[in-house]
Amino acid sequence: MYPVKRPRRIRSSAVIRKMVRETTVTPDDFIYPLFVTCGRGIKKPISSMPGCFQESVDELEKTAKEVYSLGIPAVILFGIPDHKDDAASEAYSDKGIIQEAVRALKDSVPELYIITDVCLCEYMSHGHCGIVKDGNILNDPTLELLSKEAVSHAKAGADMVAPSDMMDGRVSAIRKALDSNGFQEIPIMSYAAKFSSAFYGPFREAAESTPQFGDRKTYQMDPANRREALKEVSLDVEEGADIVMVKPALSYLDIISDVRENFNLPVAAYNVSGEYSMVHAAAKMGWVDYNKVMMEVLTSIKRAGADIILTYFAKDAVTLLNE
């Protein structure tokens, strides 16, 4: 007996496949990460992240114009200061590298939406995301510095701040600080479920933020924990997060799906450096088709429930989508 139900009927041509496609990736889905460093005329390749660079502000402006011209609506900035100390003083200095970069981009590419990563690891001499005493990362004193950093970014002109430190209570502290300084309209995109992942390796080269002792497992989440992710997201929602993020993305698609099903807020996912670099490495060896795997990765993140994707693939993906 011939089958009555034949799903293949709507796979028979590219036209019908596109018409019934359930998940579509568009340029508006992307936030492109950028790394800004001190000096002028600097565009230093990041060896473990092909196509990515540490850039001085003047070079960053050129890249930002390119990004916007491609149709990518937003960038997120990570800073590499020329001075680090145990108080992360460059993180909240009005003359800090991020603050200078924000002002420059707002002047040269005013339509581009500027998000700043709010964390201390790049600015701490020890590379941890908080104040350290006797080998311990102190939660509450760290909140004061994170709040100062967020306010300084807002003063410089940032459109959104994104705390990535995973300290308890930081969304509430930052929200209070922003509001009390007249920045009630600045949204917070919280790295709400950020896991202690081995996929961050290339990023630590890019941001020069490798911890000088121990690891980040006392504040970033255990990769084995699914229910705890919902608890972390719930706390950030209660504290006033406007967008919640899952990081990493590709190995945590179940977490993205859980967050999408349980919370009525926009969900972001960070397609992190290790995920990006693996595709490049495999493609270089001729083992996979770079464009096809890139788009499959991004589609899977969107299909899982992400509204927004932070990805180093953004420029390549948009170029492909625009063809």
Image: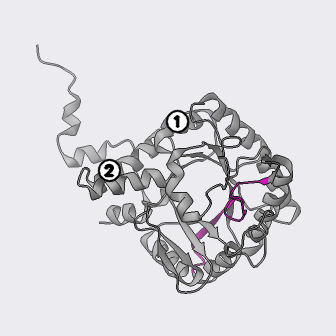
Please tell me how crowded label 2 is: few (under 14), some (14-19), or many (20+) other residues with Cα within 10 Å.
some
Instruction: Depth check: give the residue in front, 302 or 169.
Output: 169
What span is in magenta? 109-131
Circle number at residue 293: 2
* Visible residue check, residue 171: yes
Q: Earlier in the sequence, mark 1 or mark 2?
A: 1
Q: How many marks?
A: 2
Residue at the image point whose x is 58% and y is 64% from the top: 207
Name the image quarter holding the C terminus.
bottom left
Disc 2 residue type?
Val
The answer to whether residue 124 is above or below residue 298 is: below
Q: Main secondary structure of the magenta part?
A: loop
The answer to whether residue 295 is above or below residue 57 is: above
Under circle 2, the secondary element is: helix
Residue 312 falls left or right of residue 239? left
Circle number at residue 164: none
Q: Contact (CB < 8 A) between labels 1 and 2?
A: no
Disc 1 residue type?
Ser
Residue under circle 1? 257
Query: At which x and y percent is residue 48?
Result: 44, 61
Name the image quarter holding the N terminus.
top left
